[in-house]
Amino acid sequence: MFGKLGVAGINSNLATFIRTIVILLVTAGILSLRHEWSKPSGLPLNSWVFLVLSGIATGLSWLCYYRALQLGPVSKVAPIDKFSVALAIVFGLVFLGEQLSWSLAIGGALILAGAIVIAVF
């Protein structure tokens, strides 16, 4: 809801940029308060690669989300965004070897069904 109100009357890419700066500042504040800063050079290369890929995916997702909020009602956009939860479950099963349980399968199916019902009807 805040995002929908925030993109009203401004460029959605600029809105995403502002949101990103706020997240950066909040995260830096939390790291500072908890004394959790560490040297980036001490991080393993594969962590860097996957964090950069995750950042790119998140950035592109936010750009698309804010543009969709400008174009459509939040009641339709937000459920479609939550479809990513179902995708994450599938990717976790396929690529990370996570185990499927009945509750996970039913919950994922309900999320998928809900997103489809709201988007289509």
Image: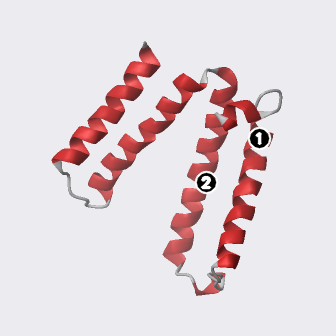
The colour mode here is: secondary structure
- Looking at the image, residue 23 sits to the left or right of residue 114; the answer is right
Q: Position of residue 3 (x, y in %)?
A: 68, 37
Three-letter amino acid code of the residue under disc 2: Ile
- Compute the Cα span from label 2 to label 1: 17 Å
In the rendered image, which quarter is residue 39 located in? bottom right
Dot 1: what SS?
A: helix
Badge 2: how crowded within 10 Å, few (<14), some, or many (20+)? few
- Name the residue beneath numbered marker 2: 56
- Numbered badge on residue 33: none
Instruction: Report the quarter where the N terminus lies.
Output: top right
Residue at (36%, 41%) from the top-left corner? 86
* Callout in the foreground (2, 1): 1
Q: Position of residue 65 (x, y in %)?
A: 61, 36
Instruction: Report the quarter where the C terminus lies.
Output: top left
Residue farthest to the top, as pictured:
121
Residue farthest to the left, as pictured:
102
Q: Which of 62/37 is in front?
A: 37
- Looking at the image, residue 41 sits to the left or right of residue 114; the answer is right
- Name the residue beneath numbered marker 1: 15
Residue at (34%, 50%) from the top-left corner? 91
Q: Position of residue 33 (x, y in %)?
A: 68, 77
Q: Position of residue 93 (x, y in %)?
A: 27, 53
In the rendered image, which quarter is residue 42 located in? bottom right
Three-letter amino acid code of the residue under disc 1: Ala
- Looking at the image, residue 3 sits to the left or right of residue 90; the answer is right
Badge 1: how crowded within 10 Å, few (<14), some, or many (20+)? some
Q: Is residue 119 above or below residue 91?
A: above
Disc tally is: 2
Dot 2: what SS?
A: helix
Q: Which of the two discs, 2 and 1, labels the residue nearer the N terminus? A: 1
In the rendered image, which quarter is residue 41 located in? bottom right
